Image (cartoon, rainbow, N blue to C red):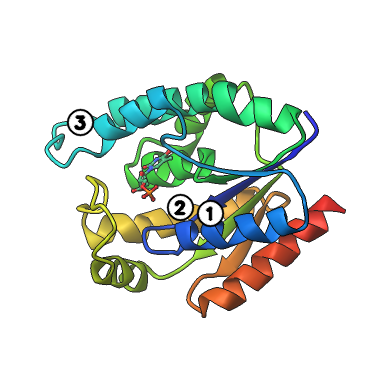
Amino acid sequence: MKGLFVTIEGPEGSGKSTLITKLLPYFEKKEQKVMATREPGGIKISEEIRTILHKKEHTMMEARTEALLYAAARRQHLVEKVIPALTDNYIVICDRFIDSSLAYQGYARGLGVDKVFAINRFATEDCMPDITIYLDIEPEVGLARIRKDGNREVNRLDLESMEFHKRVREGYLQLVDRFADRIIVVNADQPIDSVIEEVTQIIEQKLL
Ligand code: TMP
């Protein structure tokens, strides 16, 4: 594989989608092959798994079922879309990847980061991002942003308690320490233009 695999991570309301919408034209203008995608989803089978995962009425979903479904969606998306694009030398910008499972299912749900990592290593055959941007924001600030945004779908995980969302952030911060050579923290509680500038510079550096 030759392209660059970039993942964007962060809690709810950290501005991942807005950032990705702006990154695409930036690299397209420079005539670089670039593709944006998301997890869970990005292709038909994984979008269908997303619907099951995020349905608000699926409150009975058990934690390991949840972790396995995210890993299954990840597997199909990786082999069907991400790896072919990387092989074709694309910059692939993916909204969430393995770190979401480690922070949400491993840490916040309490399944254990190493256990969730193990099923994901099976799912990905150890294919890891070249670089991960973690958009850091206090859960109170992120969730307040979401409430203001009438266009955003509210999913089953958005309805979790503030305690859960605080644990998600703690989980991410532990991952930042553990994978210091891969994950770069960007403060998401600043104007979006500053976030975009910081992230484009980080990716540009990685392309050199
Ligand atoms: P989003 O793409 O709109 O941020 O929604 C995805 C939701 O799914 C979000 O609440 C985080 C959650 N999620 C996990 O819990 N584990 C995962 O592995 C992934 C990819 C997402």
Mark 3 closeness class: few <14, some 14–19, many ≥20 residues within 10 Å: few
Residue behind mark 2: 171
Q: Secondary structure at mark 3?
A: loop
Q: Is mark 2 within 8 Å of ligand 1?
A: no
Note whether residue 144 is visible.
Answer: yes
Q: Mark 3 is on which residue type?
A: Met
| Residue drawn 50% across the image and 33% down it | 114
Quadrant for the N terminus, please.
Answer: top right
Is the C-beta separation of discs 2 and 1 under 8 Å?
Answer: yes
- In the displayed structure, does residue 56 sit left or right of residue 172? left
Note whether residue 121 is visible.
Answer: no
Mark 1 closeness class: few <14, some 14–19, many ≥20 residues within 10 Å: some
Q: Secondary structure at mark 2?
A: helix
Q: Is mark 3 within 8 Å of ligand 1?
A: no
Disc number for residue 174: 1
Residue 57 place in picture, x, y as percent: 11, 38
Residue behind mark 3: 61
| Residue drawn 29% across the image and 25% down it | 65
| Residue drawn 65% across the image and 48% down it | 179
Which of the 4 image quarters holds residue 137? bottom left
Q: Mark 1 is on which residue type?
A: Gln
Q: CA distance from mark 2 to mark 3?
A: 21 Å
Tag 3 or tag 2, which sits nearer the N-term?
Answer: 3
**Residue at far right of view:** 208
Q: Secondary structure at mark 1?
A: helix
| Residue drawn 14% across the image and 37% down it | 59
Q: CA distance from mark 2 to mark 1?
A: 5 Å
Q: Mark 2 is on which residue type?
A: Gly
